[in-house]
Image: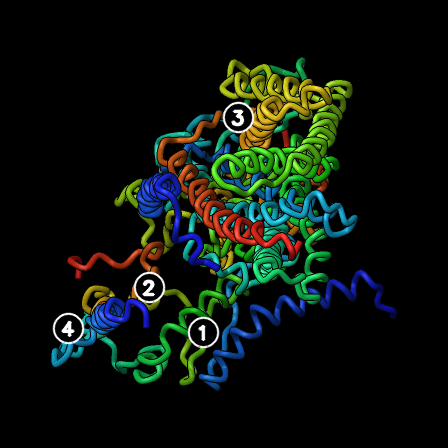
């Protein structure tokens, strides 16, 4: 092999750099995020249930919101009748954020943990948090 | 009854379109969530084709204009950037000769010559902006409204080049710092940098049973209704007055009509 | 074959590093634009397309012009172009790369660019433009690479590329036609709403592309042992001559329609560009420079004695290129927006970051071109020493 030494050294450096994040984070644990549900509106709810079950929302809220925006903007719908038969106006800013008025303690908690950066709030105005 | 080729193509196109966007969204929703369903609001105002008539003679003072424009811009969080280059506007004043280039005559009454007119999106019957959009971010609703889906807009600005009425604004920069916090409508989103925006005939208000904000604040100068309903208010005004539209020769079919009046007793 | 781009003279590497430095500056400015928004450019609500889209338009023409070599060589067996046809194909690759980059930097929401494919919209010309441009890039990559590889081995190109080569002919015409349709189908813009737009685009493309290629051939001959051939350059010169005349003729048609009909909407953009309108005249000196360069170049080109002198031809080609760049890479787009839909004039001039991003993309194009030409030349220098195979 021509330049064998150089190639092997290069390969070692490449593998080292490429796997650096794995080694760097090895053995470290980050605390599970615990989004807070203690906003005044939620506290007053008799039945503490989102538009769908907690499990469903946890797994599918992004798809639900994605569908909502098409259903409202592109197809002129407004009302969502959930599995339980309850009706909601499909609106992130006015319905979701009405209960979950604590974006920092609710949305951001998990999104930061999972390192996802949805751009919802580039347009949708979150409630003022110190007002609660 | 036979179905002609044109009609067939229309239906085929519409169902293909629906298949690509709408149906899939509902299907997806229903498969994951079998019992959920969606519907328009019970109070929603509906029409076959929404239209507006602006009776310019009824808008008299500067305050009248400002009230109408402000009603729209504040309710929709339209930023006031303060320079012409980055300007964003949905409804604004233009002089007669600028609003109707090629139509304006030299020897018309002075009162009309320098009278401000309101300019806004014409919600064309055959909108060139919709034709050119590469992502269907701007699209025509069944009720005639030319709507914007800001989530989907890639900011190519083809629609701005295509619009014959200069009705579209681009967010050349983040609009948020230019919306006064006190005037911010907390129930309506802002836009983000890099998307195109324009008047939506207040589709969000129609869905809740309310007429457009500008109409509400116009003291009857702006009339809104269904162009295809012969008993609607717009049709009554249209059959009783001579009206003009902007650039009708282009064939896009604007849905905004102007009553000029001119005399004080008009 | 790529390894051939990794060995070169000091001059070669200096050139590469200069390009990389300009690309770096452009990239930093693009990051600024990405953060701030397109407001960093000179574009406005009234002139909502500027330098980026006009560069794109101009370069689609340069890319399409490869067909002016492909047709004579492959369809008419014009052997003289045997050595330059690869240079034309590689120029097309570099030009299309720039086109795609110029579209990308012009987007307000570049992260959503895939929406064009996720929500395909056949009624939008921009959708078709994205399709044909990418297709053209792939066709030229495959054709250029395969023919060069075959050349290196001293064998004829494989049979399966032939259909692709033939396909590249109508495809080249299509990319520039579709680009013209972006403009020519908009009902409110008098300056663009003209049936000869696509024809004019092709005319100017077949002048500016081969003109650039002649200049590149002369440079290649200077810096390497590879000679594209005097005859090939002269043949290209004739193509530039005819195409430039066609282009000027088509532009003349526009002037006639606008000014003989006296329809204000048709005249205004021309008045703005060549004389100034309502006291605004930023583009007037440039447009006249374009006109003078066009006349000068035509005088040289139409005169066979002058055209045959290579330094005169080179000068004429530089004049053609600059003239058409001003006309199409600047005036064409701005003219469509002035005056605006309310008969008001808003002027446009690129901002510094906008100019630097533009320069950065041109440098990327030249980097791609340099690398591809380096490979092609290395192969040709090698095979030139195997006379028995040719």
- Residue receiving disc 2: A118
Q: Nearer the viewer, residue C280 or C141?
A: C141
Asked whether the viewer can see residue C338, the reply is no
Tell me what residue is drawn at x 73 percent, y 66 percent: B11
Marks 4 and 1 belong to one chain: yes
Q: Reading the chain from its start, which is encountered first: label 4 or label 1?
A: 4
In the image, B82: left or right of C306?
Answer: left
Q: How far apart are marks 1 and 3 (CA)?
A: 43 Å
Q: To which chain does the residue with label 1 belong? A: A
Q: Determine whether C127 is above or below C200 in the image.
A: below
Contact, CB < 8 Å: mark 4 with mark 1?
no
Cα–Cα span, label 2 and label 1: 23 Å
Residue at 39% x, 42% y: name it. C12
Q: Which residue matches tag 3?
A: B116
| Badge 4 vs badge 2, beta-carbon distance below 8 Å | no
Q: Mark 4 and mark 1: span between their CA atoms? A: 46 Å
Asked if marks 3 and 2 fall on the same chain, the answer is no
| Count of labels in the image | 4
Residue holding disc 4: A24
Q: How crowded is mark 2: few (under 14 residues within 10 Å), some or many (20 or more)?
A: few
């Amino acid at each position: 092999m021509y330049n064998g030494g150089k190639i092997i050294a290069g390969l070692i450096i490449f593998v080292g750099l490429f796997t650096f994040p794995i080694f760097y984070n090895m053995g470290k644990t980050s605390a599970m995020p615990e989004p807070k549900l203690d906003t005044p509106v939620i506290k007053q709810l008799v039945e503490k249930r989102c538009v769908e079950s907690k499990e469903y929302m946890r797994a599918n809220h992004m798809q639900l919101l994605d569908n909502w925006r098409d259903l409202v903007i592109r197809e002129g719908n407004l009302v969502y009748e959930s599995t339980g038969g309850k009706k909601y106006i499909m609106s992130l800013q006015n319905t979701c954020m009405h209960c979950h008025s604590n974006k920092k303690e609710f949305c951001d908690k998990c999104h930061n943990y999972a390192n996802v950066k949805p751009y919802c709030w580039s347009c949708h105005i979150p409630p003022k948090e110190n007002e609660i | 009854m036979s179905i002609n080729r044109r009609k067939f193509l229309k239906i085929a196109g519409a169902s293909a379109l629906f298949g690509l966007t709408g149906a899939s969204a509902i299907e997806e929703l229903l498969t994951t969530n079998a019992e959920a369903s969606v519907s328009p609001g019970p109070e929603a105002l509906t029409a076959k084709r929404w239209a507006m008539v602006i009776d310019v003679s009824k808008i008299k003072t500067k305050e009248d204009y400002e009230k109408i424009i402000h009603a729209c811009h504040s309710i929709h969080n339209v930023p006031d950037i303060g320079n012409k280059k980055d300007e964003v506007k949905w409804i604004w004043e233009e002089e007669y000769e600028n609003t109707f280039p090629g139509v304006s005559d030299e020897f018309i009454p002075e009162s009309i010559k320098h009278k401000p007119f309101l300019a806004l999106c014409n919600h064309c019957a055959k909108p060139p902006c919709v034709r050119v959009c590469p992502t269907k971010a701007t699209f025509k609703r069944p009720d005639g409204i030319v709507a914007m889906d800001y989530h989907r807009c890639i900011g190519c600005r083809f629609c701005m080049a295509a619009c014959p009425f200069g009705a579209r604004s681009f967010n050349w920069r983040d609009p948020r710092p230019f919306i006064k916090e006190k005037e911010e409508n907390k129930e309506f989103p802002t836009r983000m940098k890099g998307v195109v925006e324009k008047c939506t005939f207040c589709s969000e208000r129609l869905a809740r049973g309310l007429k457009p904000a500008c109409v509400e604040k116009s003291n009857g100068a702006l009339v809104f209704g269904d162009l295809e309903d012969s008993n609607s208010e717009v049709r009554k005004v249209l059959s009783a007055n001579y009206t003009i539209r902007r650039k009708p020769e282009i064939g896009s079919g604007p849905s905004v009509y102007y009553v000029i009046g001119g005399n004080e007793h008009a | 074959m790529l390894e051939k781009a990794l060995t070169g003279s000091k001059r070669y590497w200096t050139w590469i590093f200069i390009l990389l430095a300009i690309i770096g500056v452009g990239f930093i400015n693009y990051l600024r634009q990405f953060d701030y928004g397109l407001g960093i450019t000179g574009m406005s609500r009234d002139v909502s397309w500027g330098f980026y889209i006009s560069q794109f338009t101009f370069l689609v023409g340069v890319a399409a012009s490869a067909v002016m070599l492909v047709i004579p060589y492959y369809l008419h067996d014009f052997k003289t172009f045997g050595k330059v046809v690869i240079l034309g194909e590689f120029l097309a690759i570099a030009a299309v790369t720039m086109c795609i980059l110029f579209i990308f930097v012009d987007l307000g929401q570049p992260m959503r660019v895939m929406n064009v494919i996720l929500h395909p919209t056949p009624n939008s010309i921009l959708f078709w433009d994205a399709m044909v441009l990418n297709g053209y890039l792939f066709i030229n990559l495959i054709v250029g690479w395969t023919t060069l590889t075959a050349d290196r081995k001293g064998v004829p190109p494989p049979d399966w590329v032939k259909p692709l080569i033939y396909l590249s002919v109508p495809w080249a015409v299509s990319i520039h036609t579709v680009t013209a349709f972006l403009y020519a189908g908009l009902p409110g813009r008098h300056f663009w709403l003209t049936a000869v737009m696509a024809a004019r685009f092709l005319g100017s493309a077949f002048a500016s592309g081969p003109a650039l290629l002649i200049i590149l051939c002369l440079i290649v001959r200077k810096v390497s042992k590879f000679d594209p051939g005097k005859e090939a350059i002269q043949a290209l010169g004739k193509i530039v001559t005819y195409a430039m005349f066609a282009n000027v003729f088509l532009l003349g048609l526009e002037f006639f329609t606008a000014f003989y009909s006296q329809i204000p909407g048709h005249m205004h953009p021309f008045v703005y560009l060549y004389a100034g309108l309502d006291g605004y005249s930023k583009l007037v000196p440039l447009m006249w420079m374009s006109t003078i360069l066009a006349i000068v170049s035509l005088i040289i080109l139409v005169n066979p004695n002058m055209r045959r002198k290579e330094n005169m031809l080179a000068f004429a080609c530089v004049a053609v290129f600059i003239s058409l760049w001003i006309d199409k890479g600047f005036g064409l787009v701005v003219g469509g927006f002035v005056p605006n839909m309310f008969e008001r004039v808003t002027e446009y001039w690129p901002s510094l970051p906008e100019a630097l991003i533009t320069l950065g993309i041109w440098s990327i194009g030249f980097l791609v071109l340099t690398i591809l030409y380096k490979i092609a030349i290395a192969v040709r220098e090698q095979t030139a020493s195997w006379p028995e195979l040719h």
